[in-house]
Amino acid sequence: MSRVGWIRLGVIAAAVALLEAACRLGLIDHRTVIAPSEMAAALWRLLASGQLNDMMARTFGIIVLAVLLAVVLGFALGLAIHALPRVRAALDPFFATYYAVPIFIFYPVMVAIFGLSVIPILLMGVASAIVAMIIATLNGLDRVPRVLGKVARVHRMGRIETAWRIKLPAAAPHLFTGVKLATSYGFIAVIASEFILAPAGLGRLISDAYTDFNNPRMYALMLLLVVVATVVNMALHALDQRWAERRGIGKP
Amino acid sequence: MSAATPGDDVHASLSGVTRTYPAAAGHPPVAALGPVSLDLKRGEFFAVIGPSGCGKSTLLEVLAGLQAPTSGSVSFEGSAVAGEVPDGIGVVFQEDASFSWLTVWDNAAFGLRRAGLAEAEIRRRVDDVLGFMGLKDFARAFPAQLSGGMRQRVCIARTLVLHPRLILLDEPFGALDAQTRLLMGDELLRLWRRTGATVLLITHALDEAAMLSDRVGAMSARPGRFLDLIATGWPRERDSTIVGEPAFGELTGRLWDNLRGESLKALGLAGMPTGLAAE
């Protein structure tokens, strides 16, 4: 690990140790926050009991599906919009302000239309993630050198083959930024939707634990989500770095 | 690949070709090229020089079929060039057009894989071309790990491996320093002799045009027309050592005589006293 990595790890460890000490010394009320070691112990008990298996499969399954749909549809739409400059000009203000609008206000509408099921949660996940992917696709395609389009024509490629063999790989580093953002947004939207209103899922379990004043359970579940989100993000970042270095892009 | 000497038969030709870019966003139409007529003989090395913006690259793209002429006609091996790049033409561009996501080996194999050749044949041809271009030790490297000159060699290898009969080079060494350009010129002559292909080289470097070509076409300022077609008279077996010969100096002098006035026109300095124009 690099020196910066060790420093980063040290800062996190120090913050956790500080919180642990503050909780143990009674500086923080245990009804408000429990010690990190208690969170970890409660999470271990929950995982070992197998109680969370179904809920984890459901929530993480929805997140994976939402992100996959957002990435595939976002790329396809980005490709189509990029090929239609007038449509793009009309949509640009919409994309620019999309994340300024709290799209969760539409969640009750989704529930009213589709019922209290997986579908409204999935749609919220896709809706949150897809625009990040569209914007990343447009940015990526903007940066594909024009000369590669000429090379494609010299090789007598059609539009679809050019998109698949040239534009997609050439824009890949930027698309990967979209994938990372879509993953984060999809994760947040699914958990938040479950927290607001859902028949099941990890978000719902956190909400129930909160209502029941069950701090160990609530913090254990929160720890689980933080750990999963961090691991996924770090894995994507590491993959991105590896590809970028290989292609000489050298992302910071 | 077989070596060939330039013959008299016409391999590709431009006849009364003009290219005008239509008006766009408040700008009037731009007459970029022509009228230009040119017969490229099979197996010859032809260089085009001219001032910046005179339509050299437009000429190359019209000949390749990447742009349609506004008037006139283009033919390659007796067939009209229209709408798409004909089979048998390879183009190397000035900009880095290597595929950054593929290794050097996979870059070179790109066209062969698309053509559906057998893996053994692909391996044979790619290994051969990488060996010829001095890239064998870098076969597993990615373009970002190579210098600009080597990346350009990757692009040339990717073109060459398809055995084009007409190779169009649009200032392929434009981004390289003078010494590297001379050495790359030697490599270009070597591959030209080996393949027997017809080569059209666009360049802004007088010495490059004079050293490499059988004939040089000097173009006017925009809209570009040929002012002079000069036969260099060099033997087919030649390399960069000819730059020290007196005939080389005479040749570059003649090219500069053709181009000086046109370059001043292109810079908007025509008609000014020499001293001012030089400033």
Image (cartoon, rainbow, N blue to C red):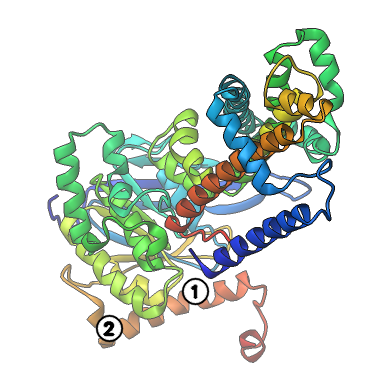
In the drawing, does residue B71 fall left or right of residue B5? right
Mark toward the start of the polypeptide (2 vs 1): 2
- Share a chain, discs 2 and 1? yes
- Residue farthest toward the bottom in the current orientation of the protein: B275
Structural crowding at the residue carrying mark 1, measured as other residues with C-alpha within 10 Å and reported as few (<14), some (14–19) or many (≥20): many
> Which one is nearer the viewer's eye here, B122 or A130?
A130
Q: Find the distance from the CA under tag 2 to the CA under tag 1.
A: 18 Å
Residue shown at 47% from the left, 47% from the top: A148
Q: Position of residue A175 (x, y in %)?
A: 57, 42
Quarter occupied by residue A6 = bottom right
- Secondary structure at badge 2 equals helix
Q: Position of residue B199 (x, y in %)?
A: 30, 56
Q: Which residue is mark 1?
A: B259
Say the numbered circle drawn on residue B198. Answer: none
Structural crowding at the residue carrying mark 2, measured as other residues with C-alpha within 10 Å and reported as few (<14), some (14–19) or many (≥20): some
Kindly identify the amino acid type of the residue bearing the numbered disc 1.
Leu
- Disc 2: which chain? B
> Which one is nearer the viewer's eye here, B21 or B90?
B90
Q: How many marks?
A: 2
Q: Position of residue B40 (x, y in %)?
A: 31, 52
Residue shown at 41% from the left, 45% from the top: B64
- Secondary structure at badge 1 equals helix
- Disc 1: which chain? B
Residue shown at 26% from the left, 46% from the top: B164
Question: Quarter of the image containing the C terminus of chain B?
Answer: bottom right
